[in-house]
Amino acid sequence: MNRRFVHIKRKVGKLDEMLSYAGGLFSIIISFLAFFMNSYNEYKYELIVAEGTFNEDHQEHSIK
């Protein structure tokens, strides 16, 4: 190794790596929550439709 030259190794983009890691983690969490929220909303919609359809007594009056 030559004494007149100094080799310096730096890693550029530490902030970029941190932001991309956080963004990827955030998108995974949002996707996971969106899947369960979509399932919950579909289930809740089916319950509302079923309640509106089958909520009658024998004389066909709505029961509330």
Image (spheres, grey):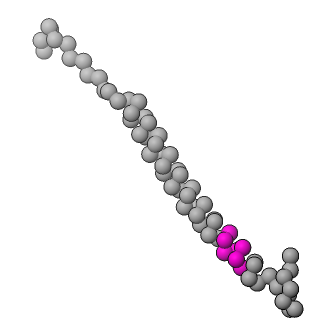
Q: Name the residue: 50% across, 46% down.
A: 26
Q: Position of residue 36 (x, y in %)?
A: 58, 61
- The quadrant holding residue 63 is bottom right
Furthest residue in direction top, as rendered: 4
Q: Over which residues does the magenta segment extend?
A: 44-50
Identity of the residue drawn at 71% across and 79% down: 50
Task: Residue at the far left: name it.
Answer: 2
Q: Quadrant of the C terminus?
A: bottom right
* Residue 34 in the image: above or below residue 6: below
Q: Is residue 15 above or below residue 20?
A: above
**Frontmost residue, 57 versus 6:** 57
59 relative position to 1: left or right: right
| Residue found at x 14% / y 8% | 4
Q: Is residue 10 above or below residue 18?
A: above
On the image, the x and y values in percent for residue 16 come to 39, 33
Residue 10: quadrant of the picture: top left
Task: Tell me the quarter of the image containing the N terminus.
Answer: top left
Q: Is residue 35 left or right of residue 48?
A: left
What count of labels does the image hold? 0
